[in-house]
């Protein structure tokens, strides 16, 4: 086989399969961390096989300069550094992400309970709605009761590796039981409110409840 033909075949093969390889060029390895593909008897979806939606593409956030602003109906508004976030009590759980488009995946998520974060800022009793803002301008909201009753977490690891940028580094909301448009990535601000709030997709007709298996769209009178 001529060298030029061999080179062409190699180039095509790399293009076809590059979607199944991490940014570091090795399947399942991210910043020298190898992802876990099974946990407590459950098979996990490799990160390279997890689909990803975003309104403005992947956001790239510097760890050192990152701040998570938590404000609104709190006694002690704060800007948390990444190190402060990962220094809070850690928890892990396996949760399925289900997109309203019909696809989904299973992953192990590691991060902090949002209840612990609210303790840090002393959430006020009249806070009923929690609004999440992303670095790309995306936003959505969830009921305070849902977040607390379901021990919802904000993740900084996925399958035991630090969230890659395309998966939401530094923080992604693990909105268990909700459609994927509630799973905010690249979180930069969390606001506690006493008023209902419609985010990016909800303003475009998507259901603000977003329960998996429930209606995707709302009928407004």
Image: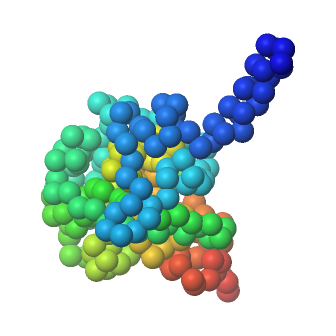
Q: Position of residue 76 (x, y in %)?
A: 16, 56
Q: Position of residue 40 (x, y in %)?
A: 31, 68
Residue 32 against residue 8 in the figure, above or below:
below
> Residue at image x 79%, y 13%?
3
Q: How many labels were placed on the picture?
A: 0
> Residue at image x 57%, y 66%?
104
Q: Position of residue 90 (x, y in %)?
A: 20, 57
Toward which corner of the image does residue 101 lie, by quadrant?
A: bottom right
Q: Is residue 156 visible?
A: yes
| Left-right relation of 160 to 37 | left
Q: Quadrant of the C terminus?
A: bottom right
Query: Seen from this angle, which residue lies furthest top?
Result: 3
> Residue at image x 38%, y 33%?
31
Q: Which one is nearer the viewer's eye here, 169 or 30? A: 30
Residue 211 against residue 63 in the figure, above or below:
below
Q: Which one is nearer the viewer's eye here, 155 or 129? A: 155
Q: Position of residue 41 (x, y in %)?
A: 36, 70
> Residue at image x 55%, y 54%?
50
Toward which corner of the image does residue 93 lie, by quadrant?
A: bottom left
| Left-right relation of 59 to 88 | right
Q: Quadrant of the N terminus?
A: top right
What coloring was used for the rendering?
rainbow
Residue 216 against residue 111 in the figure, above or below:
below
Residue 25 against residue 218 in the figure, above or below:
above
Q: Is residue 132 visible?
A: no
Query: Seen from this angle, which residue lies furthest front?
Result: 1
| Left-right relation of 153 to 47 | left
């Amino acid at each position: 086989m001529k060298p030029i033909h061999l080179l062409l075949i190699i180039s095509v093969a790399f293009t076809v399969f590059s979607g199944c390889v991490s940014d570091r060029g090795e399947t399942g390895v991210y910043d020298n961390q190898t992802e876990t593909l099974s946990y407590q008897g459950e098979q996990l979806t490799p990160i390279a096989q997890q689909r990803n939606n975003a309104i403005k593409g992947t956001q790239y956030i510097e760890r050192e300069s990152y701040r998570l602003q938590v404000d609104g109906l709190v006694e002690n508004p704060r800007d948390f550094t990444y190190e402060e976030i990962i220094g809070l009590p850690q928890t892990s759980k396996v949760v399925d992400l289900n997109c309203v488009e019909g696809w989904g995946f299973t992953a192990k998520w590691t991060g902090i309970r949002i209840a612990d974060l609210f303790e840090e800022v002393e959430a006020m009793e009249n806070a009923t709605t929690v609004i999440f803002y992303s670095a790309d301008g995306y936003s959505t909201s969830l009921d305070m009761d849902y977040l607390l009753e379901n021990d919802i977490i904000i993740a900084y690891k996925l399958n035991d590796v630090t969230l890659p940028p395309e998966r939401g580094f530094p923080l992604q909301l693990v909105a268990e039981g909700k459609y994927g448009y509630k799973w905010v990535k690249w979180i930069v601000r969390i606001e506690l409110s006493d008023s209902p709030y419609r985010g990016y997709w909800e303003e475009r007709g998507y259901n603000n409840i977003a329960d998996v298996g429930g209606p995707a769209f709302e009928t407004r009178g």
